Amino acid sequence: MRKSLGLLACAGASVLALDSLLWWGGVQFLEHRLASASASGVAQSVGCPVVFQHKQRGGWPFRAQVLLEGVQIMCGASAGQGGVSYAVRHAVLDLAPWHPLTVQGTLDGGQALAVQAEKGPAGGQKPGYLLLKTDGAPVRISLPLRAAEAGTLLFHTDFLHLVPQRGVAQAHPVTARGVSGKLVWNRHADAQASALALSFTAQRAVVAPWADSVDDVQGAVSLPGPMGRLVALWSLDEAASNDPPASDAGNLGGGESADGAMGSASKDQLTSSDHGATDAGSPAVLPSSPSGASPGYAEILVQHVGGRWRGLGISWSGRLVMATGGTPLGETWLTLSNWRPFLARLQQDKTLSPAQTVLLSKLTDQLEQRTGGTEGPLSVPLQVRDGAVQLGGVPLLSVLATLHSVSLSGASAP
């Protein structure tokens, strides 16, 4: 009996020793993965160094974990040139036997995307600026096991609040539920392939100041290569000097600026669900790329961004071009499906005033004449000028704001 107990104790000690050895090896692998991020991955040509304020090892005995506080990733920065940076308050990287081919992770706390400062032509310094802040539930991510020049990052979160920090979009924060998607990168992409591509879905989203939600949100956006052209997306323009400067690495990663200005929203506003992403596009309606586009230009291919609002299918697609220090411009299309039943429901809606009902009837008649009464989606051309989507030369957000005011007045009518 004593001999059996001794053998059992030796076996237990051997298992613990082996498990500790595997845990230590996993932690070392994760730390090496972090160290290699500066020399490989999404933007190896300019480097994407990862800096953090505090690191802790954990997860023993069944998984290897590295816990980071005040994390910032800077890409595209070189001598005297600005770059883009991403900051998050808390991050956890996880390696476990039940997902041996991927590194799982969790991003928690406020997140921020910013453009870093760069030197001006006269030797001065142009300040950086914030582009986007986010808050919400923890974001779960999945990375390739090893650093690669091409790969995919998967992400999912139950709740997300996006707060743009520049331009007219500042007045339109987005609250989304059931968000998932993937980010694909390819360092060796040429002009015929995507250097970066993002696809995403959300069960429901609300865009301020409108209270109505958009359901079944889907989107797919890609940036054709080569990777060096993408620097035009974050090159500073003169207008940047009129905006508040971005915080430095310490403040973005661990200071109050990453969380303090984040908007908050109730998680009970929406319900959660996941949907598969699709990458369907409409190449026939997209203008061709400018001939001889130099590395000073970046192209943005919007394959589709859309959803469903009160039964009306909405999809936006197009190709945009952005020069260094400039704003996006291009030709896009807004496609509406199931618009006839949508207009019929509005005509039957008792909340509209008599004048609005007459206007809606005229609009319906004009659309019927334009389409010849045939079934199918309706496409409307939209221009993008000075970074704003325009309908007939009028910014689309102004048109939507007017429609929002009309809907409010109709709802309040007796």
Image (cartoon, rainbow, N blue to C red):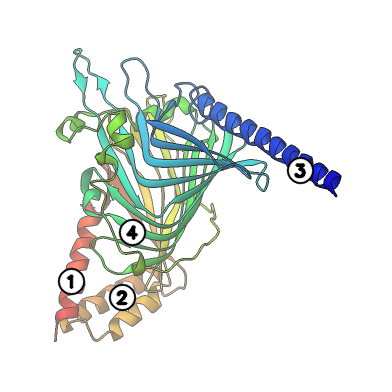
Position of residue 81 in the picture relative to residue 350 (left or right): right
Residue 148 seen in this snapshot: no
Q: Which mark is residue 9?
A: 3
The image shows residue 413, relative to residue 77, as above or below, that is below
The numbered mark, 4 or 1, whose residue comes first in the sequence reads: 4
State the residue position of label 1: 406
Q: Amino acid at mark 4?
A: Thr
Badge 4 marks a residue whose secondary structure is strand
Where residue 241 appears, x then y in whole percent?
A: 17, 30
The residues tagged by marks 3 and 1 sit, at their Cα atoms, a distance apart of 78 Å
Cα distance between the residues tagged 1 and 2: 17 Å
Q: Secondary structure at mark 1?
A: helix
| Disc 2: which residue | 364
Q: Name which of mark 3 and mark 2 comes first in the sequence.
A: 3
Q: For mark 4, does the 10 Å Cα neighbourhood hold few (<14), some (14 to 19), or many (20 or more) residues?
A: many
Residue 282, given in percent of the width and then of the height, sits at: 50, 52
Q: Is residue 102 left or right of residue 10?
A: left
Q: Is residue 385 above or below residue 49?
A: below
Q: 287 and 250: which one is in front?
A: 250
* In the image, farthest residue toward the top: 123
Q: Badge 3: few (under 14), some or many (20 or more) residues near its Cα, within 10 Å?
A: few
Determine the CA span between mark 4 and mark 1: 23 Å
Identity of the residue furthest to the front in this view: 2
Which residue is labeled 4 in the image?
A: 175
Q: Amino acid at mark 1?
A: Val
The percent coordinates of residue 185 (x first, y second) are 53, 36
Q: Nearer the viewer, mark 2 or mark 4?
A: 4
The residues tagged by marks 3 and 2 sit, at their Cα atoms, a distance apart of 82 Å
* Identity of the residue drawn at 38% across and 68% down: 270
Earlier-in-chain disc, 2 versus 4? 4
Q: CA distance from mark 3 to mark 4?
A: 55 Å
Mark 2 lies on a secondary structure that is helix
